[in-house]
Each structure stands twice: as C-alpha cells, then as structure tokens.
Image (cartoon, rainbow, N blue to C red):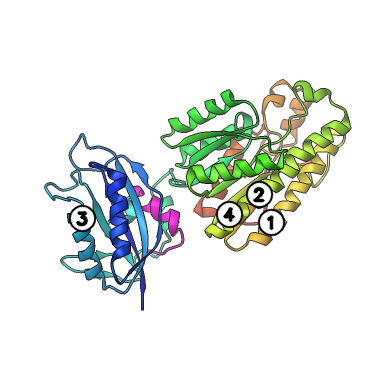
Amino acid sequence: MATVAYLALGSNVGDRSGQLERALHLLEEREGIQLVRVSRFWETEPVGGPPGQGKYLNAVAAVETILPPLELMQFCLSIEEQCGRVRREKYGPRTLDIDLLLYGDLVLHTEGLSVPHPRMHLRSFVLGPLAEIAPTAVHPVLQKTVTELLASLGHRSLLGKRAVVTGSSSGIGRAIAVELAKRGADVIVHANVSREKAEETARLVREAGVRGETVLADVRDPESCRRLVESAWQMFEGLDVWVNNAGADILTGGNARLSFEEKLRLLWETDVCGTIRLSRQVGQRMLEQGWGLIVNLGWDQAEIGMAGDSGQLFGTVKAAVAAFSKSLAATLAPRVRVNCVAPGWIRTAWGETASETWQKRAVGEALLQRWGMPDDVAGAVCWLASSDADFVTGQILRVNGGAVR
C-alpha cells in the first residue's frame, strides 16, 4: 500500500531551477514512486551557514510511494549526487538538497534518518511551499497542521499566500494589499485605469519583501473579468486569497454629479455584477484547487438602512453583495471559504472632506468613539486569511467600532 510522503528540495548553486526540475524528473522515473504534486519554486534568503551565499530556490513535492522511508531517503541522496552535490560544510551552498519531511504519520528516529524532519516546523522556507500543496497535513508529533505551524513562526502568518485585491490602487484596497504583504503574502494589485496608482501600491507591497504585481481591468465588463482572473491565476500559478474590494465612487469627483439612476447603474455594474462574476470564476478555480478564501466588501448599514439617496444606493448594492456571499459560501463549502467584511464609517477620501455634521455622526455612532481607518478593515481581512479563521465561512464581519443608532 502506497504512503504519501513530502520531500523538500533546495538549490542555490548553478542552474537552480534546472536542478530542481531534474530532481523531480528522476523522482518521477523511479519505480515505486509516483509524483503527485509540486509547489511552485520559492526564492528565499539562505538561513545559517557561511556568509555570502546566493539565494535559494525551494520547493516541496508530494509523492505516493511503496518504498520504505530509509530506501526513499537513500534514493534522494543518490539524486543529490547525480546533480553534483558535494558535502563540504554544514549549511553551505549546494547544487541540490533533498529532505524527507513527512512519511504518512510515521515517527522515526534512527542514526541516519529522523521523520518528521526535526527542524521543518522552524523553517518558513519549508513550511511555505508545503502549505501551498498540503495546508491541512498534520505534524504527527506536534499535532498541528502545516498552516498552524507556519502561523506560529510570527507576524508573517500569511507567508506563502498568494492574494489578489481588486480596487487596491488607493484607500481601503491599498491598506488591505499592504497589510497582506506585511504578513508575508504575495499580492496582485488591481486597478481600473490608474496604472500609476496601482504601481505605487505594488511598490509598497514589494517593500514588505514579497512579490507585488499589477493588473488593470474594468470589472464592469465580463470579458475583462475573465481576463483578470486568468492572468492573475497564471501570474501566481494559483491563488489562495481573493478580495473583491473594487467599487464605484459616487461621492467624490465627477460621479458625484450623476443622476440617481446613473449612480445606481454604475454601482450595480461595479459592486454587484463585478463581484459576482469574479467570485464565481475564482471560486470554481479554488474549488478545483482544493482550497481558497474569497472576501467581499459590504457595508455595515446595508441591513438596517440609512436615510437619503446614498443610503438607498449603497444599502441596496451592498445588501446584494452580502446575500451573494452567503450563498456562494454554501455553494463552495467545505473546501473554499467565503465571507463578507462590512465596514462602517471609515476615514477614506470622502471622510477627509466630510462636513462637521458627518464628522460628529461618524464618531458619535461608534462605541469606540472614533472614525474607522483603512487599516482596521485590512486587519479584519488578514484575520480571515489566517489559519485562525479556518472555521469561519458564510459570515458578515462588521468593522464599525460597535456602531449603534
């Protein structure tokens, strides 16, 4: 009977990707080993060892094998030799390194092999790729999942996650993108037309030491939505988190002068239809992938209503987003989670110039007696993306300082 095992591969000398590819090919050719899945190649800084080493390319491969663990490890050592591995100094540069991380639920300690790998739970460059292909695999000694082990390494609890944030060239979307990056996630920044603003957000993302890319797309257009999902998925070779933040601004700029009907049409096409199209397409891909999280942005007053044209407009479209999120969560469960974050009074561009009346109202309606900030919303989204929220789906999370009326 075959056992599922996980192998970590790394290289920082010569043709790094070529050596990893060759090792995978040799594994695939060996009788008694079936290559099941491989993570993408991660570039990381060397940890320990002599100074001046080059960066590593790391990957984790899942295999099904009938080979005993010692025989499997001996074959991996022979692959290292075929790829030119010479052992000179501990943690020194190497053309190829292969470690056996997990072998089913086996716990083994011998002079030549320890399983689980004794340091795997301390290495983000191992846990990151492993979480990509086996986030729920359990460490048989520590009795924690891979995502839990990754989160325990510190504030970069989202290390290795791949995220898209629509409408992230400014405001709440920018705050979400940057905070995801600070916690370790690679982020694709989306904007409608402003590449300059999108690139500014991507620059802030990259400053956190992760990958930041930009994509332009009009979410009102079905074909544009399809291309956005396709290009984002290919760019990161899969996605873990998708945040639908893109929404029409009808409070500032030229759109503020539109008629009620024009504003309603713009909001409906952007906030509702765009969110539904993107979520359905991304959700299907995540379902096939086996995991993922979708977060849609709503509004805390959609349920209780607010007087005036703006209340009627935003209440209608954001209530639709919340209702859709709950239904999509039921559709994609249990493999993909879907939640709606519903901000209250958040100090974005409109809040900066709001009248004294609105300033007092925003502060007065919150139990915490202050405006909400974009970072408050970003923190909620990051929590949903973390392993701490693995049991949360189909929910509306209000970020409004305990607003009461």
What amino acid is labelled 4 in the image?
Arg
Expressed as whole percent of the image width and height from the top left, the position of residue 214 reads: 54, 33
Secondary structure of the residue carrying tag 3 is helix
Asked which secondary structure carries label 1, the reply is helix
Prevailing SS of the magenta stretch: helix
Query: Could you tell me which quadrant the C terminus lies in?
Result: top right
Is the Cβ of the residue at disc 3 closer than 8 Å to that at disc 2? no
Number of the label disc, if any, that sits on residue 328: 1
Query: Which residue is pictured at 61% across the width and 35% down the height?
Result: 173
- Label 1 – label 2 distance at C-alpha: 8 Å
Query: Is residue 40 toward the left or the right of residue 55 in the image?
Result: right
- Going from N to C along the chain, the mark reached first, 2 or 4, is 2
Contact check, label 2 and label 4, Cβ < 8 Å: no
Three-letter residue code for mark 3: Glu
Crowd rating for badge 1 (residues with CA inside 10 Å; few <14, some 14–19, many 20+): many
Residue extending farthest to the bottom is: 1
- How far apart in space, not on screen, are marks 3 and 4 (Cα)? 35 Å
Question: How far apart are labels 3 and 2 at the CA level?
Answer: 43 Å
Task: Residue 251 in the image: state x and y as whole percent.
Answer: 77, 27
User: For residue 360: magenta?
Assistant: no
Q: Of label 3 and label 2, which has the lower sequence position?
A: 3
Residue 71 placement (x, y as % from top left): 22, 70
> The residue under label 1 is which amino acid type?
Leu
